[in-house]
Image: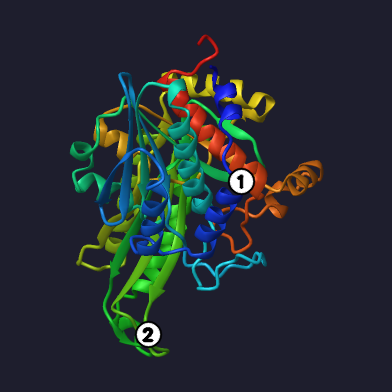
Amino acid sequence: MNIADVLASYPVDEAWQRELYEWFHRNPELSMREENTHARILEELQRFDCEVVAPIGGYGICAVFRNGEGPTVLFRADFDGLPVEEATGVEYAAATGTMHACGHDIHTTALISACDVLDRAREAWSGTFIALFQPGEETAEGAAAMVADDLTSRVPQPEVCLGQHVMPGRAGTVMSKPGPQFAACDSIRIRIPGRSAHGSMPHAAIDPTFTAAMIIARLQGIVGREVNPADFSVVTVASMHAGTTNNIIPGHAELVLNCRFYSDATKAKVYAAIERVVRAEVAASGCEEEPAIEFFAHGELLTNDERSFATVRAAFDEAFGEESIIAEPTTVSEDFPALPAAFGVPYCFWLVGCTPREQWDAAVAADRVTEDIPVNHMPTFLPEYEPTIAAATGAAAASVLAYLGASESN
């Protein structure tokens, strides 16, 4: 039985799936606080013949489906929400100031649905399937927390890790590519020292606000003048804070940067330049105290293994035909790579288009995709349900089946 036949022969109960999705969408929870989401996932997993390993790293869950001899494949879905006030207007919208504005409700529903398919289609595959449900992706805490909580010794060793993310694109398309898919990222907190004085006596101060302004100006030249134009790089000054009142020059200022790259070599070059600029401008301002530079919210470069991509892409082409397309690299970031890194295995991670089809087609025709299409983390972000959930469920099941036995040659 080939992959397309398996998907056609074991359809998901649409009423159950829709109720599950709407429950997740209506009840988002912030990163590492996903108690009710955790409980609902555990409740759903009781329907299947699997071993449940939980909790892992807070609210993390693994469901292990054993089905005889064969490879072991791990598929991950994340399930935390964002501190965003929903503005979609749907009847199942969240009303808590927290929102599934990044599509993690689709991710979780799709993986539970894939569990349903694979649990009923055991004659079509052989081996071990691990469904990993991860908390805290939005804060880049969850994958690391699961690894730190002995994930690798609590579940079987996989040969490959798989995952997906809904993104702007025509709903129902499955978009994959080899090599870099999501950017490496870090946030950087910089404390700029100075010397406080009354606002009427600037000569008695070392003004950290002025130093911060000089640093901001110089940072813009790093990407524009030190990075090869062929190498992607972003250095964003996300926040600047100094002072608390109107007539006092503050004693320090703080900048927070967000940086993204597709190359670790470019990243190293840019980070060295940032440190050079910061230290030089502080020294130029006459301050003998050193600045403090702190890295946080780290995300590894997400770059797909060529062989894993080839295996997964063949399954997508079989299952989705013309809806299986080449992805473009995106500048967002993910903590997913921490999982395959912990196991020391390759991975493949792809995108599922979720923009309502009519809206996408109109925006493409008018060359207004950037202007007219809601993107992840916006209060109006809402996947077109039917084509998106069908593609996400099918892609999850098809990718696992590609390793566990179902193929056109079977």
Q: Position of residue 181 (x, y in %)?
A: 48, 35
Of residue 199 and residue 146, the one placed in the foreground of this image is 146
Residue 237 against residue 13 in the figure, above or below: below
Residue 284, x across and y down, in percent: 31, 62
Earlier residue among tags 1 and 2: 1
Report the side of 222 relative to 250 (left or right). right
Q: Residue at x 52, y 67 (%)?
A: 84
At a point 21% along the width and 63% down the height, the residue shown is: 290
Secondary-structure class at tag 1? helix
Residue 18 lies, with reference to residue 206, above or below; the image says above
Placement of 95 over or under 147, stated as above or below? below
Horizontal and vertical percent position of residue 291? 25, 63
Labels 1 and 2 touching (C-beta < 8 A): no
Residue carrying label 1? 14
Q: Amino acid at mark 1?
A: Glu
Distance between the Cα atoms at labels 1 and 2? 56 Å
Q: Can residue 31 be seen?
A: yes
Query: Residue placed farthest to the top in the image?
Result: 409
Query: Which image quadrant is residue 262 in?
Result: top left
For the point 36% across and 57% down, which residue is it?
A: 38
Instruction: Judge depth for marks 1 and 2 and give the one in front.
Output: 1
Q: Which residue is mark 2?
A: 244
Q: Amino acid at mark 2?
A: Thr
Q: Work out whether residue 270 or residue 102 is closer to the camera in this orientation and state it.
A: 102
Q: Residue 76: x percent and y percent?
A: 40, 40
